[in-house]
Image (cartoon, grey):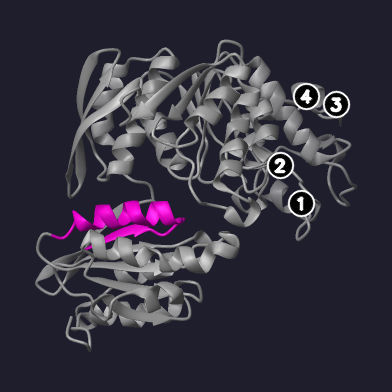
């Protein structure tokens, strides 16, 4: 296993004190997931102190631990003592970025950033050694951890950047120092913490504050806030590339054919027509694939190869992943979009669902959308029109906020309402039958993943018609 950090390198990066001569092949901040050879970083938070788990990390195979407080019973030769472990993690991140010759792409946006990150990871990994954000490690500790884990020989790095408040992206983009920065879209998400969508756009545009010299900013040309964000990027000396359906987009979507499990995309880049298959259905995926190809070009990759490789893209767990479940003498399609939700992403999911059930019914099971502030009740209720327009047959709702949508729905579309995800499960399972397509979506805090698990474990006796005859 290759060496990621020597004791001396880690001490220099963190301005720490080390007595041993260990070599770490990985970095961890969670003792439950420590792998042999890891450097364990004992972060301290409001609910947990990593120093309490240092000995457990050693038992799991950690070769060293970064600490800022005494750890009784620990071998001093295995400790890297620093003034503050969070600052130490940031120090490792800076050093990893400084020593790397990789070209770096940062990705943010109200919706779509994880999908873009995964498409970039897929396409770039077939063109060079690629390191990318894992899971949702996109915040003030996740991004430096991702950098600290970056192998020395990385050629492409793809770093997702999330935020809930102004200033958060500014801090992490300065660590990442991207060569290319993407803003996928600006929508009404996290509005609990922002007075307006324009303020969200300004916060997303913070990603350009860390751009390297001669950097490239890739922006959704269709957003009303394109000019605002483009101006922010140009202040940093960036070249701006627009993608979308807009006539002035540098990479323009000309046409797309949406099929139940894929898209056929036709686009124009530099007066060249690109036609390719994207292995994920949905117009939002088609649009975001343009950002991916623009980034591949800006990073010096092969755009034609990347376009071909997008046929192998599959939606990640919780973000549109599709499952086929045997039921009775047929099957049920379960679309797991349970990781997150906003008004825009639910509308996009309705459109995908509409393409997904040529035989049976199209059923949506929705949990609360969180962090939407004072407008939250109205934003939930407003989804009724989108549900009707999309052709969804039934909508089940779970949670106090989604009760507003339930009340706004026509009687014929109401599948049922319950107080939370666990309570809605029996209603949904009693209704689903062979041939149906079931979309499950909600913010992570609404825990709609439990509904997905229940559907994936259905048995024949759970397939009964709804009491209201749907």
Q: Nearer the viewer, residue 264 or 254?
A: 254
Question: In the rendered structure, which disc, 4 or 2, sits on the residue that comes first in sequence?
Answer: 4
Quadrant of the image for the N terminus? top right
Q: In this view, does 403 lie above or below 130?
A: below
Query: Does the CB distance between marks 3 and 1 fall below 8 Å?
Result: no
Q: How far apart are marks 3 and 1 (CA)?
A: 20 Å
* Residue 15: mark: 3
* Residue 13: mark: 4
Label 2 belongs to which residue?
40
Q: How far apart are marks 2 and 1 (CA)?
A: 9 Å
Label 2 Cα crowd, 10 Å radius (few <14 / some 14-19 / many 20+): many
Label 1 Cα crowd, 10 Å radius (few <14 / some 14-19 / many 20+): many
| Span of residues in magenta | 333-357
Look at discs 4 and 2 and give the one toward the viewer: 4
**Residue 40 percent location from the top left of the image:** 71, 42
Q: How far apart are marks 4 and 3 (CA)?
A: 6 Å
Query: Does the CB distance between marks 3 and 2 fall below 8 Å?
Result: no
Query: Does the CB distance between marks 2 and 1 fall below 8 Å?
Result: yes
Residue 430 seen in the figure = yes
Label 1 belongs to which residue?
50
**Residue 388 percent location from the top left of the image:** 26, 65
Residue 35 seen in the figure = no
Q: Is residue 152 above or below residue 148?
A: above
């Amino acid at each position: 296993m290759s060496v990621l950090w020597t004791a001396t390198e880690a001490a220099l990066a963190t301005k720490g004190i080390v007595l041993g001569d260990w070599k770490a092949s990985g970095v961890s901040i969670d003792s439950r997931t420590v792998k042999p050879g890891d450097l364990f970083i004992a972060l301290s938070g409001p609910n947990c102190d990593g120093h309490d788990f240092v000995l457990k990390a050693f038992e799991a195979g950690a070769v060293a631990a970064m600490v800022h407080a005494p750890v009784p019973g620990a071998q001093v030769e295995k400790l890297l003592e620093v003034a503050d472990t969070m600052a130490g993690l940031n120090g490792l991140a800076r050093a990893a970025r400084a020593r790397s010759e990789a070209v770096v792409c940062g990705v943010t946006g109200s919706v779509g950033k994880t999908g873009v990150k995964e498409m970039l990871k897929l396409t770039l990994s077939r063109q060079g050694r690629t390191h990318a954000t894992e899971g949702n490690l996109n915040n003030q500790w996740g991004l430096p951890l991702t950098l600290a884990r970056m192998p020395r020989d990385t050629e492409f790095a793809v770093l997702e950047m999330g935020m809930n408040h102004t200033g958060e992206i500014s801090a992490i983009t300065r660590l990442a120092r991207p060569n290319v920065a993407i803003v996928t879209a600006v929508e009404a998400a996290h509005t609990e913490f922002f007075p307006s969508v324009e303020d969200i756009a300004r916060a997303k545009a913070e990603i350009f504050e860390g751009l390297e010299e001669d950097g490239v900013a890739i922006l959704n040309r269709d957003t009303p806030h394109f000019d605002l964000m483009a101006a922010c990027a140009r202040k940093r000396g960036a070249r701006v590339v627009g993608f979308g359906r807009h006539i002035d987009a540098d990479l323009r979507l000309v046409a797309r054919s949406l099929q139940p499990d894929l898209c056929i995309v036709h686009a124009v880049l530099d007066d060249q027509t690109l036609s390719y298959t994207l292995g994920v259905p949905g117009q939002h995926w088609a649009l975001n694939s343009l950002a991916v190809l623009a980034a591949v070009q800006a990073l010096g990759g092969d755009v034609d190869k990347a376009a071909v490789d997008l046929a192998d893209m599959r939606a990640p767990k919780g973000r549109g992943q599709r499952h086929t479940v045997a039921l009775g003498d047929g099957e049920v399609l379960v679309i797991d979009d349970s990781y997150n939700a906003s008004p825009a992403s639910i509308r996009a999911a309705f459109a995908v669902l509409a393409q997904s059930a040529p035989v049976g019914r199209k059923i949506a099971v929705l949990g609360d959308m969180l962090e939407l502030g004072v407008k939250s009740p109205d934003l939930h209720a407003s989804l009724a029109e989108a549900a009707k327009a999309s052709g969804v047959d039934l909508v089940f709702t779970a949670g106090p906020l989604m009760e507003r949508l339930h009340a706004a729905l026509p009687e014929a579309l109401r599948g049922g309402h319950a107080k939370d995800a666990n309570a809605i499960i029996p209603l949904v399972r009693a209704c689903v039958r062979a041939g149906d397509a079931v979309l499950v979506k909600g913010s992570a805090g609404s825990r709609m993943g439990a509904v997905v698990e229940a559907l994936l474990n259905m048995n024949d006796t759970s397939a009964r018609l709804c009491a209201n005859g749907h």
